[in-house]
């Protein structure tokens, strides 16, 4: 009887070991042992895929043309968030409809609002005291946010910390070159013509970085209403500075900007549509505009050309 008990215990132990191995293989099968990172916006996902290199599998919930201010998580999104190892979102109320989901999932795994690591004194506020969440348009601030994400990757996989750090430093050198190039281009625009008119107020940090006056028809969030007064005030600014062009955004309805163009035309000012800018969303994956650097360059080149009167 004692011999039979020993045999049964041995069999049970073997089954438990086999089961544990099977579960481990199952958990690693989907991503070949990579760190599963889920982000909200592509402005986080694409840089993190570079910093993490071959050791991360990164997925962005919000693709081209998607407005993060209005976005609500689907059941599929919740499943992806729960199945990830790390979650990165921008924060500062950019993804306001997902706050509860982040709070719940944050009890089980690292969930970081990376923009919220930026010192408060460096952030912009509107007239009502709301913080501007569009910090990726200031390269220096976005580096702070990406540094936070990098430190989270290091904490998750300390054995890869040196590699993550080297990748980050290499990428940050590219960002520094991007900032220098952007500054050189945008300062070619006469100072009295450096007025950027867009559908919503997403370019405040960009304007501060490059000494450009920014006018957004909507407030910081696309949930804000646009009134006749907003349109009339914008037309008045165009008339005052004789601005040659205004811009639409890839994730925002164009009707309000078209109303501004028509209104200025009725007052004798020929305002062109300067082109489409990427604000809350980047371009299609696999294109230059589908990268953070490519998106940024596209915006700089489009603004430079249009405000110098070389637009369409």
Image (spheres, helix red, strand yellow):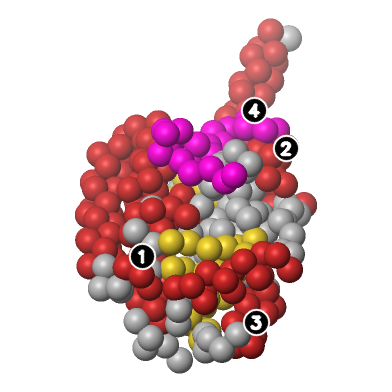
Q: Name the residue under label 3.
A: 263
Viewer-side label of 1, 3:
3
Q: Which residue is at a point 63% across and 78% down the rendered structure image?
A: 260
Of residues 130 and 58, the one nearer the viewer is 130
User: In the image, residue 26 lies at what x, y percent?
Assistant: 59, 46
- Comes first in the chain, label 2 or label 1: 2
> Is 217 within the magenta?
no
- Comes first in the chain, label 2 or label 4: 2
Q: Name the residue under label 2.
A: 100
The magenta span reads 103-127
Whether 162 is drawn above or below 174: the answer is above
Whether 269 is drawn above or below 299: the answer is below
Q: Which residue is at a point 34% across and 54% down the rendered structure image?
A: 209
On residue 293, the disc is 1
- Count residues near mark 4 (Cα–Cα under 10 Å), then give few for <14, some for 14-19, many for 20+: few
The mark total stands at: 4
- Count residues near mark 3 (Cα–Cα under 10 Å), then give few for <14, some for 14-19, many for 20+: some
> Is 105 within the magenta?
yes
User: In the image, residue 82 lies at what x, y percent?
Assistant: 66, 42
On residue 107, the disc is 4
Position of residue 75 in the picture relative to residue 182 (left or right): right
Looking at the image, which residue sits at the far right?
Answer: 75
Q: Is residue 99 visible?
A: yes
Q: Are marks 3 and 2 in contact (CB under 8 Å)?
A: no
User: In the image, residue 154 lies at what x, y percent?
Assistant: 36, 35
Viewer-side label of 3, 4:
3
């Amino acid at each position: 009887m004692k011999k039979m008990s020993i045999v049964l215990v041995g069999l049970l132990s073997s089954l438990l070991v086999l089961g544990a191995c099977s579960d481990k293989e199952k958990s690693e099968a989907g991503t070949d042992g990579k760190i599963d990172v889920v982000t909200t916006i592509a402005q986080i996902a694409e840089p993190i895929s570079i910093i993490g290199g071959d050791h991360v599998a990164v997925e962005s919930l919000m693709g081209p043309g998607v407005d993060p201010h209005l976005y609500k998580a689907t059941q599929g999104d919740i499943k992806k968030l729960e199945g990830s190892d790390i979650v990165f979102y921008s924060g500062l109320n950019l993804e306001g409809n997902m706050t509860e989901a982040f709070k719940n999932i944050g009890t089980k795994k690292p969930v970081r609002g990376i923009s919220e690591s930026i010192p408060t004194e460096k952030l912009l506020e509107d007239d009502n005291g709301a913080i501007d969440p569009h910090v990726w348009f200031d390269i220096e601030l976005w580096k702070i946010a990406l540094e936070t994400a990098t430190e989270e990757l290091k904490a998750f996989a300390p054995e890869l910390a040196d590699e993550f750090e080297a990748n980050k430093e290499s990428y940050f050198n590219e960002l520094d070159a991007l900032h220098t190039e952007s500054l050189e281009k945008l300062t070619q625009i006469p100072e009295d013509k450096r007025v950027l008119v867009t559908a919503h107020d997403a370019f405040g940090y960009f304007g501060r970085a490059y000494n450009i006056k920014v006018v957004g028809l909507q407030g910081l969030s696309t949930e804000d209403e646009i009134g006749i007064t907003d349109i009339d005030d914008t037309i008045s600014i165009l008339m005052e500075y004789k601005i040659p062009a205004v811009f639409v955004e890839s994730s925002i309805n164009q009707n309000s900007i078209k109303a501004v163009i028509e209104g200025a035309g009725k007052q004798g000012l020929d305002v062109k549509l300067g082109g489409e800018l990427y604000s809350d969303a980047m371009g299609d994956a696999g294109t230059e505009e589908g990268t953070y650097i490519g998106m940024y360059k596209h915006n700089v080149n489009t603004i430079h050309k249009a405000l110098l009167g070389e637009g369409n």
